[in-house]
Image: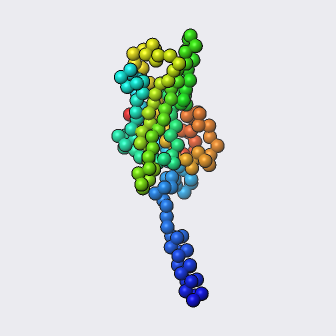
């Protein structure tokens, strides 16, 4: 009887050890280089869209997982031929005590099989009527999708887009739209 139980337990443990959860694992190679993805997109804030716009990952041929980190940056300016990106949320102080905030959220859902991130919504907030700025504003944003294991294992300043994109532990696939 004891022999049958031992044989069953050994067989059960062998079966468990052969199972793989690679579908949930972040893509990497033997050197622990994680693969991230960047998108550069332009959005228009208008009264008609409530001063918000949506970037849809599926429409752009990409499927991030809920475990991924979604970072967003706004093109602030140019200096000596270089783009200057500010992390979101970004608070801008205007004259007369007015405050304008560039912000974003991403939407995710569990579909029964995998957790997915569907889209990123960029929006403006303020302590005044945003329509006072201009009837519409066009802005450029960069979306950086990073496997969460990369952020957990690397001390990196995510507020600086250059340190994220130039990290030796991550390779980015760029999608300039």
Is residue 54 found left or right of 28 in the rendered image? left
Picture coordinates of residue 161 (x, y %)?
55, 34
Q: Using the rendered image of the protein, determine whether residue 151 is visible from the camera's viewpoint.
A: yes
The answer to which quarter of the image holds residue 157 is: top right
> Which quadrant does the N terminus fall into?
bottom right
Is residue 127 found left or right of 139 in the rendered image? right
> Is residue 143 positioned above or below 62 on the image?
above
Q: Nearer the viewer, residue 9 or 79?
A: 9
> Which quadrant does the C terminus fall into?
top left
The answer to which quarter of the image holds residue 4 is: bottom right
Q: How is the image coloured?
A: rainbow
Picture coordinates of residue 48 (x, y %)?
36, 22
The answer to which quarter of the image holds residue 47 is: top left
Q: Nearer the viewer, residue 75 or 69?
A: 69
At 40% from the left and 35% from the top, the residue drawn is 55
- Name of the residue lying farthest toward the right: 155
At 55% from the left and 47% from the top, the residue drawn is 148
At 41% from the left and 31% from the top, the residue drawn is 41
At 42% from the left and 55% from the top, the residue drawn is 113
Q: Using the rendered image of the protein, determine whether residue 174 is visible from the camera's viewpoint.
A: no
């Amino acid at each position: 009887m004891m022999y049958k139980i031992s044989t069953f337990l050994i067989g059960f443990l062998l079966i468990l050890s052969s199972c793989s959860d690679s579908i949930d694992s972040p893509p990497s190679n033997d050197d622990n280089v994680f693969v991230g993805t960047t998108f550069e997109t332009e959005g228009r804030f208008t009264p008609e869209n409530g001063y918000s716009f949506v970037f849809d990952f599926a429409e752009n041929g990409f499927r991030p997982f809920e475990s991924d980190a979604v970072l967003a940056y706004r093109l602030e300016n140019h200096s000596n031929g270089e783009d200057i990106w500010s992390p979101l949320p970004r608070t801008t102080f205007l004259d007369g005590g007015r405050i304008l905030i560039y912000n974003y959220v991403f939407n995710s859902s569990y579909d029964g099989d995998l957790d997915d991130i569907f889209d990123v919504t960029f929006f403006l907030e303020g302590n005044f009527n945003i329509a006072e700025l201009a009837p519409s504003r066009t802005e450029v944003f960069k979306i950086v999708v990073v496997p969460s294991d990369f952020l957990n294992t690397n001390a990196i300043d995510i507020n600086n887009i250059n340190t994220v994109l130039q990290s030796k532990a991550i390779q980015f696939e760029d999608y300039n739209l």
